[in-house]
Amino acid sequence: MNIRPLLVSPLLVAATLACSQTAERKNGDGAGASGGVDASGGTGANGGLNASGGTGASAGAGVSAGAAAGAGGTGVGGAGISSGGSAGSFTYPAPVAPWQPSQACLDQAAQILAGMTLRQKAGQMVQADSASITAADVATYQLGSVFSGGSSDPPTDDTPQTWRTFVEGFESQASGFGIPLIYGIDAVHGNNNVSNAVIFPHNIGLGATRDPDLITEIGHITALEMHATSIDWTFAPTISPAQDERWGRTFESYSEVPALAAQMGVAVLKGLQGDSLRGPDSVVACAKHFAGDGATQGSVDKSDNVLDEATFRRLAVEVYQPLINAGVGSIMVSYSSYQGTKMTGNTHWLTDVLKGEMGLRGILGSDWAAFNQLSGDLATQIATAVNAGIDMLMEPKVAGQDVDVLEAAPAASGSANIPMSRIDDAVTRILTIKCEHGMLAPGYDSSGDAALLADLGSQAHRDVARRAVRESAVLLKNDEKVLPLAETAHVHVAGSGADSLQRQCGGWTVDWQGLGTNSKAPGVSTGTTILTGMRSIAGNDNVSYSQDGSGIPAGATHVVVVLSEAPYAEDKGDTTNLDLASRTPDVPVLQAARASGLPVVAVIVSGRPLIIEPYLDLADAWIAAWLPGSEADAFADVLFGRYAPTGKLGHTWPKTMAQIPINVGDADYETDPPLFPFGYGLTY
């Protein structure tokens, strides 16, 4: 990956300060019209900052600042932002002020550790995939954790009660050896492995809201819906500042700007863990993936970072400090490498920097079988990872074998040796977080609150998701003020994303690669679509639909085409071609709509900015919906003007593939401008 030199310029000042939902957006007359950020100075009500600056000359020209920042200054990465408001204060880069566990929990962890056998310690350091073990194996190997990978669902169905029973079957087996099991899952946009749970927009959309209070509320609801299914640990949030839209996990990134990614990460952490890990609604969060997964060479998932150390720290490392300070219970290590050395086995970054310089006191876990990518036999792989700083091994297949290797490691020689002091440190961290979470308290019950099952997927929870859908929408173009649509308009709706729960939810939705993609047992869930929302507002008689755009009825006044990517997750989403015609099947539909002679609105349902510049003239208005989740009907509120757009781009929108990677602060950001700059967003 070629990272361009960073320039701290007025552009950076305006763009980074545009981290507030309250910034005023001026409506423009299309892509070439004035449409940058125009905000008066002051502190945003939702925890961001408003910029004092002018608007860019055009959407393509970017955002130019008319004045410098207020006290504290601003910049991307190393230059910093500070903000306040109802979400609390936020300063970036953050000082090194790490959360410290209580002395009571440190004492209890030490007391338990002193009475443990080496095999019991080894068991605590292994996290087994539910698909690879039986419940009885928890007791046999005295496992510290079980998790369900993206496709490791209960064997019968994904209903909430089934998940609860399934999880408790594993948790109950830990009672015999006295250290409760902590159960983990990728609840990355709601408790998204469970049918009928509320599915929130993915992080790329949430970053566009610039609303930390909303993100905290989303985290809290996610925690409640996890407790309903007796799950205590989520592998979220992803706080990687994605630097290249070709990366298949861009949709999991709040922003390309580390400061904004960190601010949103702290906000969701507050919702997930609450004020204390011991709180009744708290679950253990996991910031990921340390470090550099969003800035790899060529943006290939799990590949190498070739950045110099200063740039690597700015783009990939410093973003973790605010979450460490806020008490994140765990961090997951990236599959990726730094200058040829896998992060999973990198002692410098894991022990010297993350645990040493930055002060992480929580659990440091590996990703799915990541230690198997290290060189050597299994004993060497495990020793390399643990000696580098990994406390808990995520094992998808042979958990018992890992326990055997760890038990033998202190007596092993050479590359297979793990000092007893390192094992004791790892287990102490695991026990301490379990203690802080209340799991070592007398009378602890591993079962979540069964009463919460009634609220899982409730309307109250879905209403918060609807708010997130509205706030995340980013209006990119609005020629002749085509939007908002009149509620009396006769609208023909078309496109692959108009009536597809699968496409609007994206990856990590019941099934790993997206709803219904598991061929053995396709997942199902409930939700609403953009089409149903439009019909709810304008009436069935005034909203016709055909996916291919055919059959536009006489009397239609507008055509809305919802173009969408198919769902994907992880490296399955890596691509070298982001052209709209490559990523969606809907360009012919858009062309047919344009040929109708009616005003056309293009809605993009995608996990990242796509190359739309060649197609801009095919629609009068363009609006990004991102991956809105299960409550996409709320997007109709934006189309019909019941909610004026407030979303601002957290990721630069490139003009061409040749521009990628392009990020705010690049040396040529103003001379070779993107199609739409970071912080851009129109309104009505």
Image (cartoon, rainbow, N blue to C red):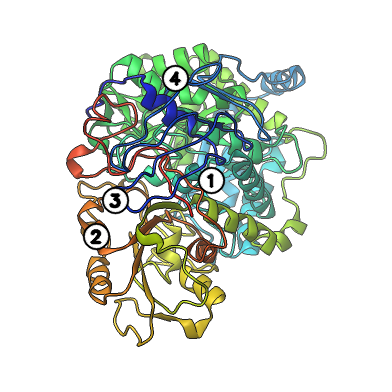
Q: Residues within 10 Å of mark 3 (few under 14, many from 20)?
A: many
Cα distance, mark 1 to mark 4? 23 Å
Q: Can the viewer see residue 56 in this picture?
A: yes
Instruction: Return the residue nearer the eye: 576 or 182.
Output: 576
Number of the label disc, if any, that sits on residue 147: 1
Instruction: Tell me which amino acid carries mark 4.
Output: Leu
First along the sequence among labels 3 and 4: 4
**Numbered disc 1: secondary structure:** strand
| Nearest to viewer (mark 3 / mark 2) | 2
Marks 3/2 in contact by CB < 8 Å: the verdict is no
Residue on which the image places disc 2 = 617
Number of the label disc, if any, that sits on residue 350: 4
**Numbered disc 2: secondary structure:** helix
Number of the label disc, if any, that sits on residue 610: 3
| Nearest to viewer (mark 2 / mark 4) | 2
Cα distance, mark 2 to mark 1? 48 Å
Position of the N terminus by quadrant? top left
Q: Is residue 266 left or right of residue 412?
A: right
Above or below residue 332? Residue 26 is below
The percent coordinates of residue 50 (x first, y second) are: 54, 32
